[in-house]
Image: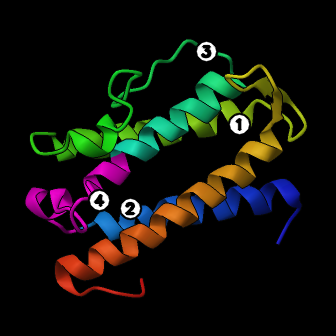
């Protein structure tokens, strides 16, 4: 299976691919469908949220780049989830894919022990970020499982 880094990267890629599968072959209306009021959770919102999460951890935290959030802000912290009624689903998917690729590119130039800085100034390693990203996707893929089953009955893929 390879070493620690290969294992972490493979699990993260599997999680990313799972989200892509959960969003595949759905209409824009289906991607926008909310889970259950008052929640604003939707598959489109998950794509937008995870694009912001990729950007936050790899560009801002690890690479220390000035990369503002794409869909949320201090004044609208849940904009990634809330503002999907008129959002462009194709744009969101392309943006998420682009952010995933940027994350891969940044990670490829660093060792597992290399560190960046969290917003609170605390150092955090690439290893920690990879583990956290696996957890983040796993949690949200559980949401995506339920959303997809509600949309069209699809389960278990």
Residue 38 lies in the magenta stretch: yes
* Residue 113 image position (x, y, % from top left): 90, 37
Q: Using a 10 Å C-alpha cutoff, classify the residue at mark 4 as few (fewer than 14 neighbours), some (14 to 19) or many (20 or more).
A: many
> What label does residue 65 carry, if any?
3
Mark 3–mark 4 contact, CB under 8 Å? no
* Quarter of the figure with residue 29: bottom left
Residues 61 and 34: in front is 34
Residue 144 lies in the magenta stretch: no
In primary-sequence order, the first of circles 4 and 2 is 2
79 left or right of 98 in image: left
The correct choice, above or below, for 63 with respect to 104 in the image is above
* Quarter of the figure with residue 57: top right
Q: What element carries label 3?
A: loop
CA distance for labels 4 and 2: 10 Å
CA distance for labels 3 and 2: 26 Å
The residue beneath circle 4 is: 43
Image point (72%, 22%), residue name: 120
In primary-sequence order, the first of circles 2 and 1 is 2
Mark 3–mark 2 contact, CB under 8 Å? no
Q: What element carries label 4?
A: helix
């Amino acid at each position: 299976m390879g070493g620690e880094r290969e294992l972490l990267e493979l699990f993260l890629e599997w999680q990313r691919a799972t989200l892509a599968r959960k969003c595949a072959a759905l209409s824009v209306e289906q991607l926008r469908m909310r889970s259950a009021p008052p929640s604003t959770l939707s598959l489109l919102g998950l794509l937008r949220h995870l694009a912001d999460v990729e950007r936050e951890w790899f560009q801002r935290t690890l690479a220390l780049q000035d990369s503002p959030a794409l869909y949320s802000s201090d004044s609208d912290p849940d904009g990634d989830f809330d503002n999907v009624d008129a959002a462009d689903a194709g744009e969101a998917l392309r943006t998420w894919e682009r952010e995933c690729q940027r994350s891969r590119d940044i990670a490829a130039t660093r060792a597992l022990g290399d560190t960046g800085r969290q917003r609170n100034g605390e150092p955090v390693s690439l290893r920690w970020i990879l583990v956290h990203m696996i957890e983040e996707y796993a949690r949200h893929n559980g949401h995506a499982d339920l959303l997809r089953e509600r949309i069209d009955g699809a389960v278990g893929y």
